[in-house]
Image: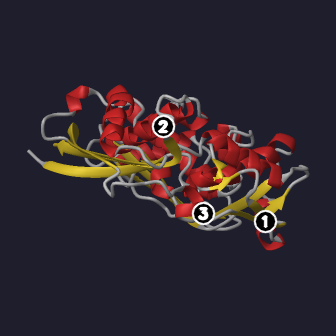
């Protein structure tokens, strides 16, 4: 019997990197609402009292970027300088240009907007076909935000992180070794009371008790204090949580971030398409695990390569799986955009708690192979 531990982390929507991701995706959605052919590459940087939005936007949309920034900060819950940033008083700087014509000439004819490699993954170990550790970490992070916004634990502040260590036996998750939660809080809160509250209101409603035993360790704010958070405690930047966004490190990553990019960027559209295909492979019982890779060249339509790894769990040869993929799916940029309906303003829904595993998103549907 093979035993091993695997750990994944997630963050709340108030984490400074996720604050930046959400601003970038809100800008993208605002452009797509008015012009579905918008080309957007919006990058956001957050520091003490300051938000900087930069990048390239080519669109017929008329949007108020500063207004979007302030509304997003307010929505997350940063409404007081003691929380890390105040949406009413922070500085908002904008430095946006148009897409380079050198790139546009390749995208205009349906080619990829850049070279790169993308991965997609699915596993049968959870009902949403995600790795167990990242699934648990996301659910805990989402619950942290829920109990804060619903004033169940009103002393919580927006910035937070979760981490879950899972013990596997022969590739099957059997128990949770460790749960770690760090969440920003008001000054003067008793740490022992906070631990009891988070166990009762966050961990117990989310984690099935069968995975917790006498040896499971639970850590809450291990430094003993987390009052200074958000952009005041650490800078934020779009695209810095790519492992949180995908599979928690359980599958490989091509390196390209998602947030703020319109679907002509294959970093985003191909990663979504490969998730859809990998999930369909597993749901069709062609394998219990499936990892796919494609590679693109800038300005070219067809992928340069397709790779499939089922880790020995396949019920038919991997060459046959690749053949089925090529026969059924159009992996050109325009083909993926049309198939998944990616010109809709759906991207703010993707930003937090993972881009995968959410049933309402189009790439989470499965087709029979």
Name the N-terminal-most of marks 1 and 2. Answer: 1
Question: Dot 3 lies on which element?
Answer: strand
Neighbor class of circle 1 (other Cα within 10 Å; few <14, some 14-19, many 20+) is some
Neighbor class of circle 3 (other Cα within 10 Å; few <14, some 14-19, many 20+) is many
Question: Dot 1 lies on which element?
Answer: strand
Q: Decide if residue 226 is on the left or right side of residue 2.
A: right
Q: Residue furthest bottom?
A: 102
Residue at point 87%, 50% (across, down): 63
> Badge 3 is on which residue?
237
Question: Dot 2 lies on which element?
Answer: helix
* Label 2 to label 3: alpha-carbon separation: 20 Å
Foreground mark, 3 or 1, reads 1
- Residue 214: image x %, image y %? 12, 36
Q: Decide if residue 104 is on the left or right side of residue 234.
A: right
> Badge 1 is on which residue?
93
* Label 3 to label 1: alpha-carbon separation: 14 Å
Residue at point 51%, 64% (across, down): 255
Residue at point 38%, 33% (across, down): 202
- Residue 53: image x %, image y %? 74, 63
Q: Is residue 333 above or below residue 189?
A: below
- Residue 267: image x %, image y %? 60, 58
> Badge 2 is on which residue?
142
């Amino acid at each position: 019997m093979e035993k091993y531990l695997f750990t994944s982390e997630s963050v709340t929507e108030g984490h400074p990197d996720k604050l930046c991701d959400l601003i970038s995706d809100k800008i993208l959605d605002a452009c797509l609402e008015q012009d579905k052919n918008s080309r957007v590459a919006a990058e956001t940087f957050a520091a003490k009292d300051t938000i900087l939005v930069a990048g390239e936007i080519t669109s017929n949309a008329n949007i108020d970027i500063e207004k979007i920034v302030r509304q997003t900060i307010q929505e997350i819950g940063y409404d007081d300088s003691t929380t890390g940033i105040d949406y009413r008083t922070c500085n908002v700087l904008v430095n946006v240009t148009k897409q380079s014509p050198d790139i546009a000439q390749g995208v205009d004819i349906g080619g990829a907007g850049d070279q790169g490699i993308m991965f997609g993954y699915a596993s049968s170990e959870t009902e949403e076909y995600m790795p167990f550790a990242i699934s648990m970490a996301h659910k805990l992070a989402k619950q942290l935000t829920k109990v804060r916004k619903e004033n169940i634990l009103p002393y919580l502040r927006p910035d937070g992180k979760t981490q879950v260590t899972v013990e596997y036996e022969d590739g099957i998750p059997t128990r949770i070794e460790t749960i770690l939660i760090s969440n920003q809080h008001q000054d003067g809160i008793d740490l022992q009371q906070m631990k009891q509250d988070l166990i009762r209101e966050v961990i117990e409603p989310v984690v099935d008790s069968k995975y917790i035993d006498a040896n499971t360790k639970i850590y809450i704010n291990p430094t003993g204090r987390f009052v200074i958070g958000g952009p005041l405690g650490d800078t934020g930047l779009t695209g810095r949580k790519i492992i949180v966004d995908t599979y928690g490190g359980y599958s490989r990553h091509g390196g390209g971030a998602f947030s703020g990019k319109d679907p002509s960027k294959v970093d985003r559209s191909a990663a979504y398409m490969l998730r859809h295909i990998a999930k369909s492979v597993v749901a069709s019982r062609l394998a219990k695990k499936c990892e796919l890779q494609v590679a693109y060249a800038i300005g070219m339509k067809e992928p340069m390569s397709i790779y499939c790894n089922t880790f020995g769990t396949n019920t038919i040869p991997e060459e046959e799986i690749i053949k089925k993929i090529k026969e059924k799916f159009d992996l050109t940029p325009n083909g993926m955009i049309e198939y998944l309906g990616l010109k809709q303003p759906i991207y703010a829904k993707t930003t937090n708690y993972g881009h995968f595993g959410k049933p309402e998103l189009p790439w989470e549907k499965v087709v029979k192979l």
